[in-house]
Image (spheres, rainbow, N blue to C red):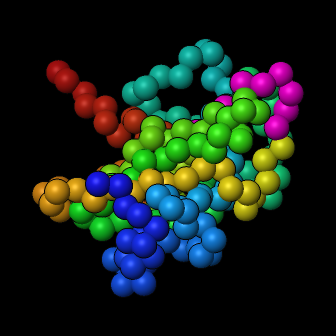
Amino acid sequence: MILSDKTILEMLAAGTLKISPMEREQVQPASVDIRLGNTFSVVEDSPAGVIPLDGEIRYKTITSDTYVLLPNQFVLATTREYFDLPDDVTAFVEGRSSLGRLGLFIQNAGWVDPGFQGEITLELYNANRCAIELKAGRRVGQLVFARMDSAALNPYRGKYQGQRGATGSRIFLDHEVKE
């Protein structure tokens, strides 16, 4: 069941859902607006021109209130907000239609597991022929919350728990060497 503004506000007041910093105006009828943070990361170029999935990937990270996303460029960004979801609530990240109409694709794999704590890393892609100026604090998307039928047996405690800033892929932690 998708949570309404009434339920979201009640959970925030009770402290069962935590979002910080947050302003009341961010709460929409069935979602909470998410704002762009001020850290951005791009994958460093590889001499081989290939990103291996079995080793740590290097990123160049900058902190800035403005980032110019060039045409056909991909960058990781972060939300300004830090989230703490209870074990019986999950969330979906959705981009803003107004920005999508400019060619800015916003994603984070779309899903936030119950029990997640941290800032959400967003994957941004500029599909336009013109650069897009990104500014920290701008509304870039929304989080839609859904209550599960019961608390998760295994709430999220994974490799991105507690993340802050634009956090690069940690896929190399999934790699197991088989002999």
Count of numbered tags? 0
- The answer to whether any part of residue 154 appears in the image is yes
Is residue 145 toward the left or the right of residue 174 in the image? Answer: right
Residue at horizontal 37%, vertical 76%?
Answer: 11
Is residue 173 toward the left or the right of residue 63 in the image? Answer: left
Say which quadrant the C terminus sits in. Answer: top left
- Image location of residue 154, percent across then percent down: 17, 56
**Residue 98 higher or lower than 18, as above or below:** above
Displayed quadrant of residue 145: bottom left
Which one is in front, 48 or 1? 1
Say which quadrant the N terminus sits in. Answer: bottom left
Residue 127 lies within the magenta run: yes
Residue at horizontal 65%, vertical 40%?
Answer: 97
Which one is in front, 23 or 85? 23
Is residue 20 toward the left or the right of residue 53 in the image? Answer: right
- Image location of residue 91, percent across then percent down: 39, 53
Q: What span is in magenta?
A: 123-132
- Image location of residue 108, percent across then percent down: 50, 42
Residue 60 lies within the magenta run: no
Which one is in front, 84 or 163? 84
**Residue 21 higher or lower than 110, as above or below:** below
Displayed quadrant of residue 4: bottom left
Q: Residue furthest right?
A: 130
Residue at horizontal 45%, vertical 38%?
Answer: 109
- The answer to whether any part of residue 160 appears in the image is no
Is residue 86 toward the left or the right of residue 171 in the image? Answer: left
Q: Residue furthest bottom?
A: 14
Which one is in front, 161 or 15? 15
